[in-house]
Amino acid sequence: MGYAVKEIFLTLQGEGAHVGRAAVFCRFAGCNLWSGREADRADAQCSFCDTDFVGTDGTEGGRYDDASSLVATIERTWGAARVDRYVVLTGGEPLLQVDATLIAELHGRGFEIGLETNGTIAPPAGIDWICVSPKGAVPLKALEGDELKLVFPQPDAPPDAFAALAFTRFSLQPMDGPALAENTAKAVAYCLAHPQWRLSLQTHKFLGIR
């Protein structure tokens, strides 16, 4: 199987439970909830995405013929360090492409695998950290994992709709945009009143890194 990748880059994880951790981000092209074109945003199942996942023209982006060649690029991007290797498979929606062969190849090169998904596709076995980020009223097929990270507020996705699911950590992330300050205040208030939830901030945006 081949893989269409928007970009691969080394950074610090900017949000959620692993914030501050060095990671290679492998961003797959394509999503099942939005085309990525602004002309389609109003009718998309997810209308607030702020990520460019269209095409394969980013850093180390391209069409990789097999898992071995993709993982070789991820390994080269990580650099010389042999310990604490961590890769985040993201998108778009990575589970449109991530498969058992890629997971095995990454583990074979010593990488711990994190996944950021909208939860509409059941993940394959073997992923070390699964973070599900629900989008509106779209039904979830990933009903358990390590972290449920909810962008807040979403009228069709209140936190209490997910609080009983089998996740280890529940993160509430203020929706970016013109109302960010207001959304942050609302998220703080919600976390204080519902301590099951922890505040997640997009620290990479504060720091000016990817």
Image (cartoon, helix red, strand yellow):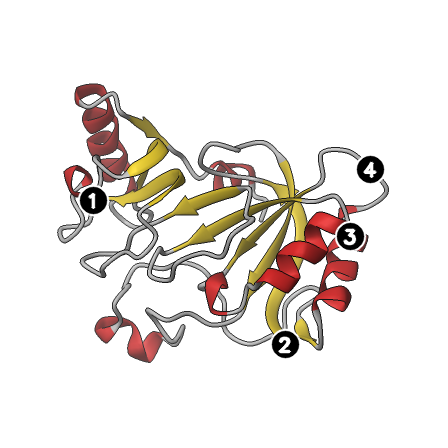
Amino acid bearing label 1: Pro
Taking the spot 43% from the left edge, 44% from the top edge, the residue there is 131
Taking the spot 59% from the left edge, 61% from the top edge, the residue there is 100
Mark in front: 3 vs 2 = 2
Residue that badge 2 annotates: 1
- Up the image or down, 103 lies above or below 191; here it is below
- Up the image or down, 3 lies above or below 104; here it is below
Q: Of callouts 3 and 1, which one flags the residue occurring earlier in the amino acid sequence?
A: 3
Q: Of callouts 2 and 4, which one flags the residue occurring earlier in the amino acid sequence?
A: 2
CA distance separating discs 2 and 1:
38 Å
- At mark 2, the secondary structure is loop
CA distance separating discs 2 and 4:
28 Å
Amino acid bearing label 3: Glu
Mark in front: 2 vs 1 = 2
Amino acid bearing label 2: Met
Residue that badge 4 annotates: 82
The image shows residue 44 at horizontal and vertical percentages of: 26, 71
CA distance separating discs 4 and 1:
40 Å
Q: Of callouts 2 and 1, which one flags the residue occurring earlier in the amino acid sequence?
A: 2
Amino acid bearing label 4: Arg
- Up the image or down, 55 lies above or below 73; here it is below
- Up the image or down, 11 lies above or below 186; here it is below
Residue density around tag 4, few if under 14, some if 14–19, many if 20 or more, within 10 Å: few
Q: Quadrant of residue 105?
A: bottom right
Q: Of callouts 3 and 2, which one flags the residue occurring earlier in the amino acid sequence?
A: 2
Residue that badge 3 annotates: 75
Choose between 190 and 146: the one closer to the eye. 146
Mark in front: 3 vs 1 = 3
Residue that badge 1 annotates: 153
Choose between 194 and 205: the one closer to the eye. 194
Taking the spot 34% from the left edge, 71% from the top edge, the residue there is 34
